Image (tube, rainbow, N blue to C red):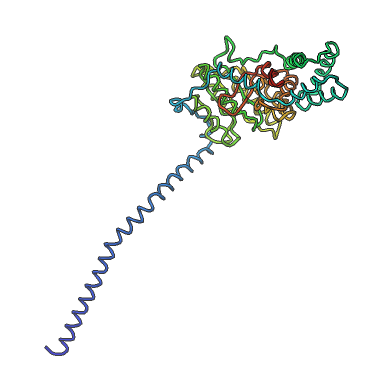
Amino acid sequence: MNTYAIIALICVVVVLIAAGIFIGMRRRGNDSRPSGQSQAQAKSQPAQREAEEGGQAAQLGSSGSDERQAEPVQAGSVASKAAEKPESSSSSMTRLKAKLAKSPNPFGKALFSILTKDHLSESDWEDVEDTLLRADVGAEASEQLVDELRADARVRGEKDPQAVRAMLREKLLALVDTGQDRSLAASRPGAAKPSVIIMVGVNGTGKTTTAGKLARLFVAEGKSVVMGAADTFRAAAAAQLQTWASKVGVQVVRAEREGADPASVAFEAAQQAKESGADLLIVDTAGRLQNKANLMDELGKIRRVVEKNLSVDEVLLVLDATTGQNGMVQAKVFAEAIGVTGIVLTKLDGSARGGIVVSVQRELGVPVKLVGLGEGPDDLSSFDPESFVDGILGGE
C-alpha cells in the first residue's frame, strides 16, 4: 500500500471515530433531557394548579360585576347539620337580668351618695341634676326628677339610706316607664307568620351582631328564621351575618357581589321566608349616615319592597349606649327614614350613660325592647326596667 492510500485510510478512520463520538454525545444528551423536563414539569405543576385556581377565583370574583350575578342567592342551609343549640330564652333572661341588676353603674351611686347626706344644699341639688345630665337622662327628664325628689325630701324628711333608695328607685322606674309594652311582635299570641323585623342603625353600633343574636333567641324558642343580608355596602357584612346564622342553622339570603341593590336582597328574602313558611324574617340593613337623604330613600325602599310580600311588624333601631347624645341624633334620623317601633341598646352593662334609656324613649316615643349585656352569643335579652334601675342603684 502506497503512502497516499495509508493517509486516506487513516483519515477515514479518524472521521468515523469522530462521528461515533458525536453521535454518542447526542444520544446521551437526548436521554438526559426528558428527565430534566419531567422534573421541571413536576416543579411547575403546583404553580400551574395555583394559577388555574387563581384564574377560577378571579373569574368568580369578576362574575360578581356581571349584572346577571347581582341577584340574591340563598346560603347557610348546609351549616344546619352542625348547628349549635342556643341557651334557652328563660335561662338567658334569668342570667342577664341578674347581670344587669348587678352591673356597676356609676351615676346611680353618685345620686345615692348625694341624697343620703344629712342636709342637702342648693349646691347638692345642682350636683344631682348635673349627674343626671352626664348620664344622658336628658335636660327635661333631669329637671323633672330633681323637682320630684326635692318635694319628696321636704315632705318626708327621710335620711335613712334604705328609705332614700326606695324613693329614688320609685322615681327612676317612673322615668323609665314600666307600663310600656316591650314585647316583640313575633313573640305575641297570634303573630303573623312570617313576622318581619328590619334592623337599622349606624355601622359600628353592633347592628349585624345584634341581628345574629336575635336569630339565636328565636331559634332557642323553636322558631324557624330566615335572614336577609341587605347591608350590601359594608365589606364583609353579609359574611358576618352568615357566620352568625350558620351556627344555629339559619338560612341567609344574600347578594353575590358587594354593592348590589339592597332592596332586591330584601325582596328575595321576604319571598323565601314566605315560600318556606318560616316563623320569622330578620333583615339587616346598611347604616351609612354620610347622606341623610340617600339613607332615607334606601331604607324606605327596603320597607316598601318587603311589604310587597309581607307586612313589616317591627323596625328595631340599634344604638350603642356609650355614645350618649350622639345616639339621639342617630335615632332621629332613622326614625324619620323608616319608622322605628323599638330600640335595642348595646353595651348597656356598666355604662355611665345608661340614662339614654330615658331620653331616647322620650324623644322617639317608642320603648327600649332589647339590651346587649356582653360579647357572648347569647348576651342579648329583653329589657327589664326593674333590673335596669337596680343596676343603676347598685342593688340592695
Q: Residue at x 52, y 17 (%)?
A: 223
The quarter of the picture where residue 335 lies is: top right
* Quarter of the rendering occupied by the N terminus: bottom left
Q: Nearer the viewer, residue 111 or 77?
A: 111
Residue 137, given in percent of the width and then of the height, sits at 76, 23
Q: Nearer the viewer, residue 369 or 197?
A: 369
Instruction: Look at the picture and state if 320 lies above or below 159.
Output: below
State the residue lying farthest toward the left.
1
How many numbered tags mark residues here? 0
Residue 276, given in percent of the width and then of the height, sits at 49, 19
The quarter of the picture where residue 359 lies is: top right
Residue 22, given in percent of the width and then of the height, sits at 25, 72
* Quarter of the rendering occupied by the C terminus: top right
Instruction: Look at the picture and state if 286 lies above or below 366.
Output: below
State the residue lying farthest toward the bottom.
3
Horizontal side, residue 9 vs residue 297: left or right: left
Q: Nearer the viewer, residue 263 or 88?
A: 88
Horizontal side, residue 113 vs residue 208: left or right: right
Residue 180, given in percent of the width and then of the height, sits at 69, 13
State the residue lying farthest toward the top.
190
